[in-house]
Amino acid sequence: MSVSSSLHTFGEYHPAVATVTVNTPLTAADADAEVRHLEVATADLRRAPANSESTTGISDVNADERSPLYTPGDCLAVLPLPLAECDVTRARDATGTVLERAGLAPDAWVTLRAAGGHLGSQSEFISKPVRAASLVEGALDLTSASARRYFFEVASTFASHPQEAERLRHFAGKDGRDELWYYNERERRSVGEFLSDFPSVSMPLEWMLTTAPRLRHRLFSISSSPLPHPHALHLTVTAARWKTHYGRIREGFCSNVLRRAQVGAAVACWLVPTFMAQPKDTTPLVLVCTGSGVAPLRAFVQARVHRSRVCQTKIAPTLVFFGCRRKAGDFLYQREWEELAGDPVALVGDASTRQGPGGQSLEGGFIPA
C-alpha cells in the first residue's frame, strides 16, 4: 500500500498549491515530440489545509514530515488552470463570451443551489457566493474539450437564429450523428469555438454548467523517488500536439499548461496513490518503456540505487530498455543513465530506431559498463 494516502489531505476539492522549481526540456529542438522535466516542491504537498489539525492540536503532517511522501508508481493529479499569459487570455475570452451570452458580468456574484434539494457529498460548496468568472474558469473546460450531444440539444433551445437552431437540432438527432462527429469530435472543437460558430446561442449559466465539459484533472506518473529527492517531486511530461483532419493545430491541454509553466508558478495538484505492488529488493527487474513512459521506471530505479548505495541493501539487478527514435535527441535522461553505467543495480540499454543517416533503422545496445 502506498504511504502517501496517510500523509496528506489534499484532493480534487481541496488541491494543494505547489510551486514549480524546475522546468527544462529533455528532447532536442527538432524532436518529433517535446518532452520536459518538471520539479515541484514537496513541502507544498505536505502542508495540510488549516482545518486539518489532529485532536492534539498538532498537525498530523508535521508528525510524519520525515516519512516518504509517496512511493514509486504513484501519480500526481494536476488541475489544468491556466498559468501562462496566452492560456489565461484564451480562458478569459471564452469565459467572457459565456457570461456575456448568459447576461452576467464577470464580477457578478452568483450562488449555486442543488436541484431538487439534494446537496450530495460536497455540500460545503453549495449556497456560497462566488464570482461568476471564477466559477466558470474553475468548473468548465471551454478551450480544449468537446461537448457531448446533449449540449447541442440544449443549445438548440437557446438559439435565436432559426437556421442555427435547426442545425443544432439536426446535430442532436439520430440523423445528424455523423455530421456532429465530423464537426465536433473529429476536430476536437471546444465550447469556445462552438460559441463563435453559433453566435445566436445565449445559454443561461445554469445550463452551461450542467451541459458543458467539466474541467478535469490529469494524472502524471511521478518520475522520482522520495528517497534521493525528499524535497522535489519530478514529472516527465510530453507536450501533446497534433493536427486535425482539416489542419487545425490542437494541443494537449494540461501537458501544455505545464510546458509553459514558469519557475515559481503555482500548480493546483494532489497525490494519487496507485497501490502498485512494490517488487522485493531480491527480485530482478526487466523494465521496458518508450518516451515519457520512463517516468515510473525511473522512480523504481532511483529507489533501488539509493537503497543499494546509501542503505547498503542487497538489491537484485534491474535491466532497463528505453526505446526512442534518435538517441541524440530523444534519449530521455541519457546523462543520468550513463552515470549509472557499471552500477550492478541498474543496467540500461537503448533501442534507437532512427539513429543513422537518412533515418534508417538501427539496433540499439547497452550503455557500456
Image (tube, helix red, strand yellow):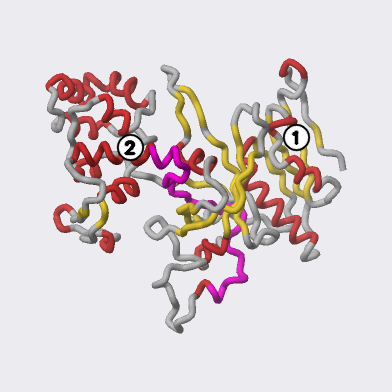
Question: Which residue is located at x 20 percent, y 56 percent?
Answer: 111
Q: Which residue lies furthest to the bottom in this view?
A: 56
* Residue 188 rendering spot, x and y as whole percentages: 38, 28
Q: In this view, does 145 lie to the left or right of 343?
A: left
In the image, 96 versus 350, the foreground residue is 96
* Residue 98 rendering spot, x and y as whole percentages: 25, 38
Question: Which residue is located at x 38 percent, y 37 percent?
Answer: 90
Category of crowding for the residue at label 2, using alpha-carbon neighbours closer than 10 angstroms: few (below 14), some (14–19), many (at least 20): some
In the image, 149 versus 88, the foreground residue is 88
Instruction: Give the foreground label among 1 and 2.
Output: 2
Read off the residue under disc 1: 350
* Residue 333 rendering spot, x and y as whole percentages: 71, 42
Amino acid type, mark 1:
Asp
Q: Is residue 120 left or right of residue 272?
A: left
Asked if residue 265 is positioned above or below residue 310 in the image, the reply reads above
Read off the residue under disc 2: 93
Find numbered disc 2 in the image and state the secondary structure of the residue it sits on. helix
Which picture quadrant has residue 321?
A: top right
Find numbered disc 1 in the image and state the secondary structure of the residue it sits on. strand
Q: Is residue 37 left or right of residue 172?
A: right
Question: Which residue is located at x 33 percent, y 37 percent?
Answer: 93
For marks 1 and 2, the one nearer the N-term is 2
Which picture quadrant has residue 97?
A: top left
Stretch in magenta:
62-89
Question: Which residue is located at x 13 percent, y 31 percent?
Answer: 157
* Residue 161 rendering spot, x and y as whole percentages: 14, 23
Q: Pick the quarter of the image with the N terminus.
A: bottom right
